[in-house]
Amino acid sequence: MSNTEYKIRTVVLRPILDPDDAQQIVENRKTSLFRSMLQKPKKTEVHIHSLKLSYEAFLILSGKYNANFYRKTVHTINVEPIVREIIVGDNVFPIKK
């Protein structure tokens, strides 16, 4: 394999949601979690014990690989004597007599 140098980049992630905004969202929605099971409690009856924001790193990669594979081989194609050339794709091969 070849010794290829890769450029290393440092990426700094900045949160879209800060802890104060998260706290406000939780305060606004904390009673809605109990609606399906129980009667809806008052906001003062539900206490938030702790709030922790977690970040997950993920990496999206995209790549492309192209390999041209050539072999040095001879293929014989038998044709009738009246044939002068064979066309394969864009290539024209004259007939050896």
Image (cartoon, rainbow, N blue to C red):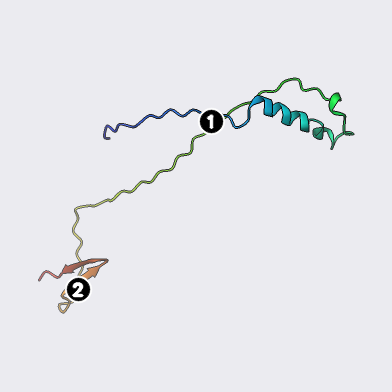
Q: Which mark is residue 89?
A: none
Q: Is residue 10 left or right of residue 38?
A: left
> Circle 1 — which element?
loop
Q: Which mark is residue 57?
A: 1
Q: Residue at x 19, y 64 (%)?
A: 76
Q: Nearer the viewer, mark 1 or mark 2?
A: 1
Q: Quadrant of the C terminus?
A: bottom left
> Circle 2 — which element?
loop
Quadrant in the rendering for residue 47: top right
Residue type at mark 1: give it.
Ala
Q: Within 10 Å of the Cα at label 1, are there few (<14), some (14-19), or many (20+) other Cα atoms?
A: few
Q: Quadrant of the N terminus?
A: top left
Q: Real-space Cα distance between discs 1 and 2? A: 63 Å
Q: Which mark is residue 79?
A: 2
* Residue sitting farthest toward the left: 97
Q: Are marks 1 and 2 in contact (CB under 8 Å)?
A: no
Residue 68 position, x and y percent, is 28, 51
Residue 75 position, x and y percent, is 20, 61
Q: Residue at x 33, y 32 (%)?
A: 6
Task: Note whether 44 is above or below 88 in the view shown.
Answer: above
Residue type at mark 2: give it.
Val
Q: Residue at x 49, y 28 (%)?
A: 12
First-in-chain label (1 vs 2): 1
Q: Residue at x 60, y 32 (%)?
A: 16
Residue 10 position, x and y percent, is 43, 27
**Residue 83 or 59: which is nearer the viewer?**
59
Residue 96 position, x and y percent, is 11, 69
